[in-house]
Image (cartoon, helix red, strand yellow):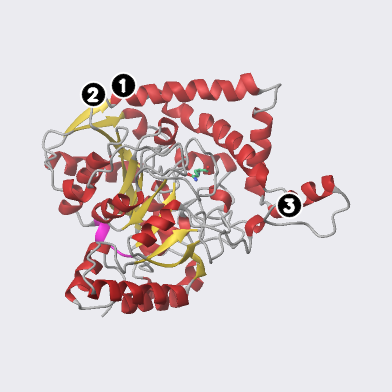
């Protein structure tokens, strides 16, 4: 039996009926990783022995009557989550070979729910990037076309789920890193409200925006996983203690009359015209579900990217100061003195994009430029948040494209650094404002997937998930697969 493109919900049915065991599912995933990963480079650590052991334990627990919905389902973690007994590299030479002494809260919770961790996914170094090309372990490929990028920074996670290596991978989203790769790989990804999911043990990039979430085939699967991931954590003081709703129990709730705001700025020049048509067709599907489309405006959309690229590097420069060659991580050979140790360890351990961000961050935080850049960016962030809040007081959800284009070519020398930054023009607003947002497969343009983005009110994941779920009941985009094995 092959289950590779099965959803979590589908696998759960087969496990419950006894049609397959978790050990068999896990073996199948591992075999698929062995076959396909050489052409994808989506997975950078595989943990076969432990995975099979966890699967055997899950099978035993099921026999003893445990019916947890995620029990025995194989999955992968973005390599930004600390895992005990398995390397955590953040795709950086700086952390090559690093093994954390503890599990991240997200890891602990999914283990606790009985999931089977197969290994860790490739990503942009320290989650900085939109193409997964900044990884120290080499670029990851898009299974729909291996000459193209899977998006980033959670590119490995998106590529792995799209290729059927596992039905779930975790991701993190600071400026779009769950939604943009989900869109480019044709899967469903959810960035929760800031503070919905604990950041404990998740390597920090820009702490005021970083948020972990599920990347899966369907909204239904994202709902099941978010239920297990979310909720208060005494180890993260920014994690909210708001009660976690039973997201999966609300998927069928009526969407009749739901007001969906369509910001005109999301359909401006930056958007590829074929992508625009696809999104417009998807908006019509939302209308057929009974939703009411409302024209809205988010005039500061064009300021989002520049605001983010002041705030995120500033926070990154502070967060990454801990990699000094002394405590843990990469250390240069034969340092002559302490200064040389710092300088060479960081110069040799970090990649180009990470160093660029540290430099920008150190500059904007310096006494001479703090008011002009960092303070200004914080003020604009406030303005952007306010605009989202105003719009979301009139509509329930905002809808538009997740990314301006479909997957672009690997090593595209015509793409400048700022072109790359523009990939997140539609996703960054939700991070600056701390709002939940997701990307849902919405069409295919020239053989490549397109994602529709839904943005909700703070802690409004229930609305996003039910709208996305009902959209997926009407459409089949989320069921399309790249059919890697046929080309293989
Ligand atoms: N692409 C954005 C960046 O490079 C977003 C990354 C992210 O969300 N982690 O910073």
Placement of 42 over or under 364, stated as above or below: below
Q: Would residue 486 be visible to someone looking at this image?
A: no
- Does the residue at mark 2 contact the one at mark 1 (Cβ under 8 Å)? yes
Q: Residue at x 38, y 55 (%)?
A: 109
Is residue 50 at least partly visible in the picture? yes
Q: Using residue 416 as the reference point, say whether residue 479 is left or right of it.
A: left
Residue at point 68% right, 30% down? Answer: 363
Looking at the rendered structure, the secondary structure element under dot 1 is: helix
Judge from the rendering whether residue 122 lies leftward or rightward of residue 386; answer left or right: right
Q: Which mark is residue 394?
A: 2
Q: CA distance from mark 1 to mark 3?
A: 46 Å
Foreground residue among 246 and 262? 246
Residue that badge 3 annotates: 325
Q: Secondary structure at mark 3?
A: loop
User: What stretch of residues is rendered in magenta?
Assistant: 477-481
Label 1 environment density (alpha carbons within 10 Å; few <14, some 14–19, many ≥20): few
């Amino acid at each position: 039996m092959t289950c590779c493109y099965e959803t979590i919900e589908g696998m759960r049915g087969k496990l419950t009926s006894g049609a397959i065991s978790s050990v068999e599912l896990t073996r199948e995933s591992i075999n698929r990783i062995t076959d396909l990963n050489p052409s994808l480079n989506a997975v950078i650590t595989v943990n076969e022995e432990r995975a099979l052991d966890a699967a055997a334990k899950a099978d035993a627990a099921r026999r003893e009557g445990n019916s947890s919905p995620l029990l025995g389902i194989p999955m992968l973690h973005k390599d930004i989550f600390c895992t005990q007994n398995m390397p955590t590299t953040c795709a950086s030479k700086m952390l090559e070979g690093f093994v954390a002494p503890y599990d991240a809260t997200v890891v602990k919770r999914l283990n606790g729910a009985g999931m089977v961790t197969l290994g860790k996914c490739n990503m942009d170094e320290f989650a900085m990037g939109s193409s997964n090309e900044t990884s120290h372990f080499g670029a990851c490929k898009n299974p729909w076309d291996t000459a193209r990028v899977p998006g980033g920074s959670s590119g490995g996670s998106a590529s792995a789920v799209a290729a059927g290596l596992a039905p779930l991978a975790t991701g993190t989203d600071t400026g779009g890193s769950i939604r943009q790769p989900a869109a480019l790989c044709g899967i469903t990804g959810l960035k929760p409200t800031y503070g919905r999911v604990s950041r404990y043990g998740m390597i920090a990039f820009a702490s005021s925006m970083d948020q972990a979430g599920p990347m899966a085939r369907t909204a239904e699967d994202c709902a099941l996983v978010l239920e297990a991931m979310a909720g208060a954590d005494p180890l993260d003081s920014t994690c909210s203690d708001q009660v976690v709703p039973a997201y999966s129990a609300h998927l069928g709730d009526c969407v009749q009359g739901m007001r969906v705001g369509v910001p005109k700025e999301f359909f401006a020049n930056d958007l590829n015209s074929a992508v625009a048509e696809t999104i417009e067709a998807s908006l019509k599907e939302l209308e057929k579900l009974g939703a009411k489309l409302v024209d809205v405006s988010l005039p500061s959309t064009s300021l989002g990217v520049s605001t983010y690229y002041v705030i995120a590097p500033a926070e990154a420069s502070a967060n990454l100061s801990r990699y000094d060659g002394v405590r843990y991580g990469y250390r240069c050979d034969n340092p002559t003195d302490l200064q040389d140790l710092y300088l060479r360890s960081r110069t040799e351990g970090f990649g180009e994009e990470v160093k660029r961000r540290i430099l920008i961050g150190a500059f904007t935080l310096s006494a001479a430029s703090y008011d002009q850049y960092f303070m200004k960016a914080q003020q604009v962030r406030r303005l952007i948040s306010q605009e989202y809040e105003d719009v979301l007081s009139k509509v329930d959800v905002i809808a538009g494209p997740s990314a301006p284009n479909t997957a672009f070519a690997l090593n595209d020398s015509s793409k400048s650094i700022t072109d790359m930054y523009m990939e997140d023009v539609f996703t960054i607003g939700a991070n600056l404002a701390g709002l939940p947002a997701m990307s849902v497969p919405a069409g295919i343009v020239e053989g490549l997937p397109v994602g529709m983005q839904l943005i909700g009110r703070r802690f409004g994941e229930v609305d996003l998930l039910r709208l996305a779920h009902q959209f997926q009941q009407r459409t089949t985009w989320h069921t399309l697969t790249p059919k890697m094995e046929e080309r293989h």
